[in-house]
Amino acid sequence: MRTLTKLSKAPGAAPDKAPGTAPDQTIGAETSQSPEADIGADSVEARRELEGRIQGASPLARNTQTPGSAGHSQAHESAVKHVTGRAAYIDDLKVPADCLHVALALSPEAHGRLTGVALDQVRALPGVVDAVGIEEVPGHTDIGPVFPGDPIFVEDEISYAGQVLFAVAAESHRAAREAVKAAFDAGLVTIDERPASLDAVAAAERGEFVRPTHIQQRGDWEAALGGASQVVEGEQFVGGQEHFYLEGQACLVTPTEDEGVVVHTSNQHPSETQKLVAEVLGIPFHAVTVEVRRMGGGFGGKETQASPWACIAALIARRTGRAARLRLPRGDDMRVTGKRHPFHNRYRLGVDDKGVIQGGEITVIGDCGYSPDLSDAIVDRAMFHADNAYSLGAARVTGHRARTHTASNTAFRGFGGPQGMMVIEAAMDDIARRVGEDPLTVRKRNLYRHESDGTQGDALPRDVTHYGQTVNQVGLLHELIERLEASSDYWARREAITAFNADSPVIKRGLALTPVKFGISFTAKHLNQAGALLHVYTDGSVQINHGGTEMGQGLHTKICQVVARELALDLNSVRITATRTDKVPNTSPTAASSGADLNGMAARDACLKLKARLFDFAAEHYALDREAMRLEAGHLVAGAAESERRIPWGELVQTAYLGRVSLSEKGFYATPLIHYDRGTGQGRPFYYYAFGAAVAEVSVDTLSGEYQVDRVDILHDVGDSLNPAIDIGQVEGGFIQGMGWLTSEELKWNEAGRLISDGPATYKIPTYGDLPPVFNVALMEGHPNSMASIYRSKAVGEPPLMLGISVWSALRDALASLADYHEAPRLDTPATPERVLLAAEALRARHSDWPPAFEEATP
C-alpha cells in the first residue's frame, strides 16, 4: 500500500493560505507549481545532467543532507540509546516463535575422566528437543583459537570444573536448565574424579607447560649482577581478574536456506567465530555470517571465549532447523570462562649506590589454566612490559606458561602487560627503601633516557629495551612525569604525609607516583591489519562499516569522526553499521588497544580513494583545477579568491552518480615497521608507546587493614586525541578497573578446584563508594604521536588500566612508614584488607614496639 505523505488535507479541500497571502496569489502559486517543487536545490542542479536523456527509475534522492564540519569531543554514537534502553543487545533481539533455548552441562570436577553420558535419556526429558555432545559434532571438535587443546565438549579427560560435557536444547530456557539438573540428579553422567593440579609454581617446577618457555636477553646480565654494589631481590603473587562484563556471554543463531547459519553474538572477534563455527559444522566459511552490533562490555573476555557458545548454538540450529539462543547465567559464565592470568613473579637486580639498575634477571610464571588459548602471547607481553618505563641495563627476562586444572585463562585489558609491570614497580619501591630515597626519586633515575651505561663494555644505550626496541619520545615520558609531579604537589604532600605518619600510630597515609609505558600493536604481526567499506548515497549521507567491534569504548564513534573529517561532513551525516563478516572479511580482533589505529586508518584509506575519484570526476566535468581541489564544510572547493568555485556535497554526489562514478570504496591498512624474532628474543614488536602517570594517596587503618583512596591525579598521553571526551572516559574507567584488580577483586577456588567467588556477592568489583573523592584526570597536550598513526593520535584502551598500580604502591608506602621507611613490605594482590593487615603486623613485629604506650588520663 502506498501512503501519500505530502497530503495534509482531504481531496478537494482548499489549500492552507500563508498569512497575508491573497487568494489569487495562493491559487496562482498552486497552479503554477513545477514538478521539481519538492526537490532540493542540490538535486535540481544535479538533475540538469538528465536533460535530453531517456529517464529511468533510480535511487536519486529528492533532497540531500545538509552537511557541516566535524568536531572533536562528540558524544558516543549510541549514548542516547544506552540511557533510554533502546540499544539492542543479544538478549533483546526478537526471535522466531520456534526458537530453541540452550543450557550447558558443566563438569563439577576439576580433573577426571568422563566415563558415561546417557544423551538418549536426556533427549527424553520433558521439553527437550535435542542434546548434543562430542559424538554429534560433524566437523572439527577442537576449537583452540591459536593452538589445539580446547575441545568443544569433553571427550574423555576433564580438565577443569566448569568444562562443557554436553548441551541441551529445549522449548524454554527453564526446561533446558531443568533437564541438565535432572541428568545429573538421575546419574546419567558419570565421572572418575582424579587429583587436580592447582599450583602454577609447582606445575612449572614439574615442567608442566601449555607452551614452551621463552627468554629475552640483552647484555651480560650475570656480570652486571656480579659488579653491582647492591643486589635487591623479591617475589610477588599477582592475582587474576574476572571480566565481569555487564552483558554476559550470549548468542543467537538462525539457520539459512542452504547449509549455513547467521550468528548474532556478543563478540570481539567475529572472523574467528566465523572460522570456528564453519569448521565445527564442516561447511565453507562463506556459509557462516557473524554479526556484532555492540557488546555490553568485553575487556578481552569475548576475544576467544565467545566462540564456543556460537559453535554449540550453530550445531543445534543446523541439526534441528530452528533458531537457537544460548546465554550463560552469571554464575556459569564465571565458572566456565577464563580470567586475567594470575602471575608469580621473581626479580634479582643489581643497583648502584643511587639505586640505578645495572642489570639482573626477572622471571614471570603465568598461570594459564588447562590449555594454551592466548597464553603464549599474553606471557610474551608480560615479558615485554617487565621493564615498564625503566631501563633494565643488561638483563634477562624469562617467561613460563604453567598448566593447571582451571579454566583456560585468556585476554584481559592489558593482555599480560599489567602483570609484567607489577614486578618492576615492586622492585622500584624495594630499591628506594634499600638506598634510603623517596620512591619517586629512584623511579626518575631509572627512566629510559638518552645516555649509555658506562659500566658495560659495549656501553648499552639506555633508551633501548631488553628486547631490542628503541623507546621513542623519551623526552615526553620525562616531561609528563615532571608536569604531574608539579600539578599534584607531590613533594609538599610527601612532606605533610611524613609528618602525619610520625604522629599517627594507627592511621597511616601513603603516596605514590607510578608511570606507564605501554607498547601498541598486536605482537602477532599478521593481526595488525584492518579493512573498511564506505558507501555514499545519493542524498549525500554516508555509511561506514569496518572490522572492529563496539563494546562501549567508543570505537564506532571515532570511526564516524574519521569519515566525517575526511569528507568534511557533519557527524550526523555518517552512519555506522553492525560489524559483519560478509561486509568486511578476515578481520582481526578488537583488542591490543589497536581498534581506532587500525580501523581508523582503513576507513581513512577508503575516504581518500573515494575523494580522489570524485576529484578526478569534478576536474573533468566542471573543468576545475584538480591540484587545488579540497572538501571543506560540506562543499567541494576549487580555486581561490575570485576564481574560487564551491559545489555543494549533495550536488557533487548526485552529479557523480549520474556520471556513473562509483560512490562506494573499500579501505585497507597494515601497520608498518613492526617485527619480532622469537628465536633471538629481539625486534620491534610495537609501532609506538603510549605513556601515562598517576599519583595516588591512601589512608590505611593498620589495626584492621581497611583503607580508602583519598585522591588521584592522572596525566595521560594520547597524542592528538581523536575524541578527548571519550578518551578521558577511557582513562577514568581504566584506572578504576585497574584499582579494583589490585585491591578488591579476589578470585577464590576451593581445594577441589571449584571457583567459589562466582557472583557479585563473593567477587567485589569497585563501586561508586570506592571512587576517590578527589579525582583529577587530564590528557597530555602538545605532543602528537611521533609515528604516523591516525591523525597522530595514540591508543587509549589498555594503558590507563596500569595507572591503578599507583594505588597498590601507595598502600606499600603507607605500610612502610611502620618501619620508618626502611622496608617496603611484600604485598601480594589483590591487596585486600586481610593482606594489608597481615603485612602491617609482620612489619610491626620486625620494626617497632607495639602497642604504643599511652599516658593515663589525670582525674
Image (cartoon, rainbow, N blue to C red):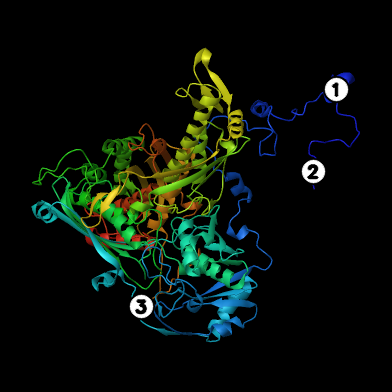
Which of the numbered marks, if any, corresponds to residue 196?
3
Q: Against 18, is 703 above or below?
A: below
Looking at the picture, which amino acid does disc 2 mark?
Thr
Quadrant of residue 689 within the rendered picture = top left
Q: Give the number of the disc on residue 696.
A: none
Q: Earlier in the sequence, mark 2 or mark 3?
A: 2
- Give coordinates of residue 551: x percent, y percent: 50, 52
Front in this rendered view, residue 624 or 456: 624
Residue 321 percent coordinates (x, y): 62, 70
- First in sequence, mark 2 or 1: give its number: 2
Decide which of 708, 654 is in the foreground and name it.
654
* Mark 1 closeness class: few <14, some 14–19, many ≥20 residues within 10 Å: some
Q: Mark 2 or mark 3, which is nearer to you?
A: 2
Q: Nearer the viewer, residue 205 or 807?
A: 205
Disc 2 to disc 1: CB gap under 8 Å:
no
Alpha carbon distance from label 2 to label 1: 26 Å
> For the residues marked 3 and 1, what is the alpha-carbon distance in whole angstroms?
89 Å
The answer to which image quadrant residue 543 occupies is top right
Q: CA distance from mark 2 to mark 3?
A: 69 Å
- Quarter occupied by the C terminus: bottom left
Q: Earlier in the sequence, mark 3 or mark 1?
A: 1
Marks 2 and 3 close (CB-CB < 8 Å): no
Q: Is residue 506 above or below residue 576?
A: below
Q: Which residue is mark 1?
A: 26
Q: Secondary structure at mark 3?
A: loop
Q: Secondary structure at mark 2?
A: loop
Q: Disc 3 residue type?
A: Ala
Side (left or right) of 709 relative to 676: right
Q: Which mark is residue 3?
A: 2
> For the residue labelled by badge 1, is the local secondary structure a helix, a strand or a loop?
helix
Where does the image place residue 423, in percent across and percent down from the top left? 27, 56
